[in-house]
Image: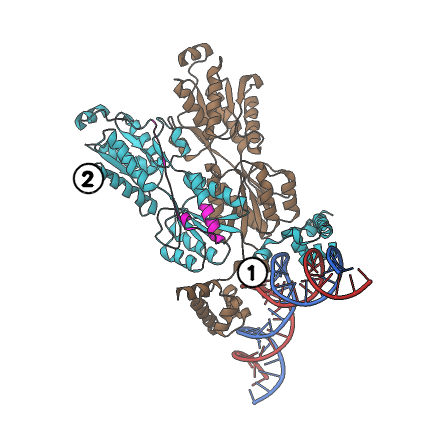
Chain colours: A brown, B cyan, C red, D blue
Amino acid sequence: MSRERWRAVKEMRIADVARLAGVSTATVSRVLSDPDKVRQKTHDLVMEAVKRSGYIPNSTAQKLRTRRTMNVLVIAPRLTNPVFAEILRGVDDELTRLGYGIIIGNLDNRREREARYVDLALSRQVDGVLLLTGYVPENGTRSMREAGLPIVAMCAAIEDDKIPNVVVQDREASRRAVTFLSELGHRRFGYISGTPGSIIEAERFAGFQEGIAAAGFGREDFVRWEGPFVFSTGVAAAEAFLKMKDRPTGIFAACDESAIGFIKRVRAERVRVPQDVSVIGFDGIEFADYTEPTLTTFRQPLYELGHVGADVLMKLIRGEMKSADWNVRLPLTLLERDTTGPVLHKDYKSLRRSTL
Amino acid sequence: MSRERWRAVKEMRIADVARLAGVSTATVSRVLSDPDKVRQKTHDLVMEAVKRSGYIPNSTAQKLRTRRTMNVLVIAPRLTNPVFAEILRGVDDELTRLGYGIIIGNLDNRREREARYVDLALSRQVDGVLLLTGYVPENGTRSMREAGLPIVAMCAAIEDDKIPNVVVQDREASRRAVTFLSELGHRRFGYISGTPGSIIEAERFAGFQEGIAAAGFGREDFVRWEGPFVFSTGVAAAEAFLKMKDRPTGIFAACDESAIGFIKRVRAERVRVPQDVSVIGFDGIEFADYTEPTLTTFRQPLYELGHVGADVLMKLIRGEMKSADWNVRLPLTLLERDTTGPVLHKDYKSLRRSTL
DNA sequence: TCGATTTTTGTAATCGATTACATCTTGTGA
DNA sequence: TCACAAGATGTAATCGATTACAAAAATCGA
């Protein structure tokens, strides 16, 4: 009996329901998709049969016929990064509300994985693509675009008048970070980078440099430490920092993780934060409020970003895009907490003594 | 021209390629799926036409015909939780290696969302389901199982002889946590729970209680603070802790976040960790190595868990399941770091004085 | 070179829904 | 009651691939 039921549920087709209700497949289909087109009596008859049989439409067949998959591909550089996880939440809420599913394309920081997802998109498994990464190569986006696939870029600045950008104001915020530090009296700066070569990193560094220039400083007034968007980048930066003679006092990290790694490492050598060195992060991850001291940082409106990005993609898919939606740039919020403060020692020599 | 190309790529079907190559659709299909079945000359001819036309098979049509979607549904309680993100990495690596896609079902801690994903699974959009949550209700799993859908449970203990479990040894590790603390001399304990009602929480608390009993203690020797798997649960627990007269000295938190929240809050009141209170976490998230002091915790083999879970599901889908694979229980590793230490004050009165 | 065997290719049914069009009902007004 | 419009339902083509089976071509031994 259990086995009977199994078969029954598994192999129920629209034709079976039609037979059960004594109507045609067309009528069953109409009842399910556009109930106003059938008489109440027929409607009830069919619904009864649907309920009895436990029929659920085969969505693959629906997709083939209607040419809509109701799926969206989201390409992200790395899922374990809480930043992307949070964006995904915003995307997911909006998309599932409208009945869309999400297929994830996790690059796991390996560029060579892109091709796989480009193929997946081109084989019409999805109605649209959300690009959370700046990595997808020009020919990848080009072929997707040529296939007429709606795409929204949610990393900084994909220069393509066919692809709308929904991004945060990375560059502006990075510029403000320097302004903020210089207004606290800092005159020597440090920049802890993100993954070299990524668009996001490029934007943030560009903003940092703009800020340096705007505050009246030049290339000789800052040092730059490179590495990916992870804790250990900050640790490595800290080790370089500790070896310096004239240490910078104002550090801007391109992500919170590296800021936290940096602070942890320098504190282990009795460098005080913020008395000896101020650190400002980027992203506003939840953990940044649980470090000691709590981290000054820029909060990205991640959930909103995901939400808006999904919304723009939906409009694109439905062809109801208005040009006003084309480029959205969301502002960041400075969370002024405890890792930044005014410069206490203007004289670097005395600073150095105090830290050892 | 650009528009021409767009149409060309977008609307290319197997029939078009067949015409271009001067063969039948059957031959094209064979070239693409089973090249050994056609002559070399024909093969080259067809491949040439494929390349020329930019043809990519419509995977929806393939799915309909072959009745395999090459997609797997992963139901997770909350994506922003780094634990699930890391499991997902393991799942993803294994699945994409075999050409499968992942559709994510993010419950975002809301149980009512399950129904949506159960429907999605039942409408044959996926070949199998990976359950990272203990929430899916009995009738949800039952209907999926009755539909003959392969399922693997990766939360603790779904009692169903049709559903293999691939889990970590939550209960054993929790028991060991108490043993570890009691061997350090602790005699009063605290338990910071995870989301009430979740299977994972139940397992961990059960293990904790077993440990209490095994060490010769009873219900009167520990306090229990409730809350979900988040930082603020630990903060709330700390506030209750701070108000206590006879404070416990050995705290076990069911997740690292709440352990971190707890430590942060008590340190703000000059309670020293581990001199005044030892704290041990659960999960082994990356952050736990960047707190001050670094957190003693159990590391879950998350990536491996995801990997093994995906592997078992693949075997299930292909019908090559061996009974030895049926139930996998992966061990956890105790990371002994700086938030745990021997009891310094056996006399609670003196302990209380020292902390204020 | 011929017939038997094997290999290659083609024809057409199939997967399970949707939907244009045709046909049949029902309802309305004279 | 009848003609006609509006509404409900049915028939069959369709989406784009795969694949069983049939047919054709290539290969081989005598």
| Residue range of the region highlighted in magenta in the rendering | B309-337
Q: Could you tell me which chain the residue with mark 2 belongs to?
A: B
Q: The N terminus of chain A is located in which quarter?
A: bottom left
Which residue is labeled 2 in the image? B218
> In the picture, residue B170 is in which quadrant?
top left
Q: Residue at x 64, y 44 (%)?
A: A162
Q: CA distance from mark 2 to mark 1?
A: 60 Å
Q: Residue at x 49, y 64 (%)?
A: A11
Q: Could you tell me which chain the residue with mark 1 belongs to?
A: A
Q: Is residue A65 magenta?
A: no
Crowding at mark 2 (Cα within 10 Å: few <14, some 14-19, many 20+): few
Q: Which-is-in-front pick, marks 2 and 1?
A: 2
> In the picture, residue A141 is in which quadrant?
top right
* Vertical order, B103 against B274 (above or below): below
Residue C18: where, in percent of width, then height? 57, 63
Which residue is labeled 1 in the image? A61
